[in-house]
Amino acid sequence: MAAILANSARFALRSGASASSKAGAAGLTFVRGKATLPDLSYDYGALEPSINGKIMELHHKNHHNTYVTSYNTAIEQLQEAQHKGDIAAQIALKPLINFHGGGHLNHTLFWENLAPKSAGGGEPPSGALSQAINSTYGSFEEFQKKMNTTLAGIQGSGWAWLVKDKHTGQIGIRTYANQDPVVGQFEPLLGIDAWEHAYYLQYQNRKAEYFGAIWDVINWKTVEKRFS
Amino acid sequence: MMTSHTLPPLPYGYDALEPVISKQIMELHHQKHHQTYVNNLNAALTAHTTATQTNDVSALISLQQKIRFNGGGHINHSLFWKNLTPPGTPGNDLASAAPALREAINARWGSEKGFIDAFGAALLGIQGSGWGWLVSSGGPKGRLEITTTKDQDPVTGGDVPVFGVDMWEHAYYLQYLNNKAGYIEGIWKIINWAEAEKRYTAGVENPVKL
């Protein structure tokens, strides 16, 4: 049964029907209580030339998968510590759960907020989100510029996100170190991975070129759903 | 007028660390990454001088992180290049090049293998970008410790960085992809134990002297 649910969730991701989890990652799937690597809804080579197929394959099959398996290991250890009533061990696992669970969440959201050009990638936002971007940043172009400056300013590994403040409804740009996920006061709308593994094979140290090219494959339809 | 920091030359050729680290990685790492830290450090220090002259305290405060990151990047890479040596060179032989350090390592971790395993585990445990270091606490011939620093944070506070290993993805990705363990296994073939012995017994000179 769980496997069937997981399969149907994958199918839902493929067909882009993610209305049931608008604010979360539609592709989060579990089999017998274990997190699983979600399928991409496009081929590894489909985001070229912005992101090449080799990067996508390694990033999904190796990096993302390692976060999934390491998260599952940490959760098993957590359950064991809970079972034993070992509070110190439970607390000690927190950084691992944050890092690997965050890596799993972040990448799942990332794949979903990207799309090949042929599937609408790069088509600018519309409706309420477009209005929010214009009123906050002046224009879509100004927002992109601000996001790129923010991405370029990340020191070390991390992510930049367009987020929504749950209390005020305002949107904003925030950076998160390493695999820290967007949780708490803010909801993730659009994430861009600024780890070197996300671009290095294609762009090496020219990360500004990667940040410039990724706009051609942003799936604003997904971002709009998360915003609404 | 303040003198600018400059990129130090490598003490060996770009291809000299092959097959452990490829020529392409070394070229990019030295000519692009390290150079960028040097450039951004100089820019931050120039802005700092101006802010000091105009007594702009809030500008001075906002420059601290840039100096930490780019100054740290310059220091760390300058130390790193020197604590590597081409494979098979005399400096790469722990027993003959670093007798005092070897004895201290064996006393602290039981054996060379015990140390190498512990150091490797610390490197693999780094979450995100950072460095792994063997440090001599408090000065030369101090207690040996394995430490990690995040991003470009340098070893500070009087501890001696005996040697460091760069665990940023740019240090290995073009060759090892996500196989961090493969990079770590290889790095022992190019550690400059002669330089490590010198730092352990006599400390480290300012690695970014003007």
Image: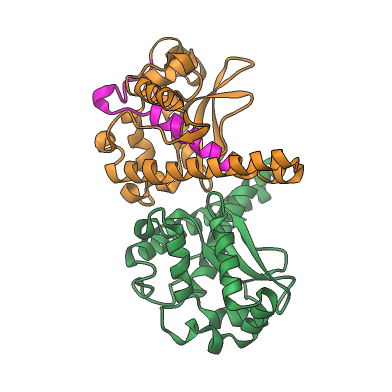
Q: Nearer the viewer, residue A75 or A160?
A: A75
Q: Nearer the viewer, residue A192 or A170?
A: A192
Residue at 43% in and 42% down: A65
Q: On screen, A56 above or below A110? A: below
Report x, y in % for residue A186: 59, 24
Q: Is residue A187 left or right of residue A110?
A: right
The answer to which quarter of the image holds residue A169 is top right
Q: Nearer the viewer, residue B140 or B205?
A: B140
Q: Which residues are magenta?
A: A98-125
Residue at 41% in and 48% down: A197
Residue at 52% in and 74% down: B83
Q: On screen, A222 above or below B169? A: above
Q: Is residue B65 visible?
A: yes
Report x, y in % for residue B21: 38, 67
Which chain comes out green in the rendered image? B
Specify the farthest residue to the bottom: B96
Q: Quadrant of the C terminus of chain B?
A: bottom right
Specify the farthest residue to the front: A1
- Dominant secondary structure, magenta: helix
Which chain comes out orange in the rendered image? A
Residue at 43% in and 69% down: B186
Report x, y in % for residue A226: 47, 18
The answer to which quarter of the image holds residue B149 is bottom right
Report x, y in % for residue A187: 55, 23
Q: Is residue B153 visible?
A: no
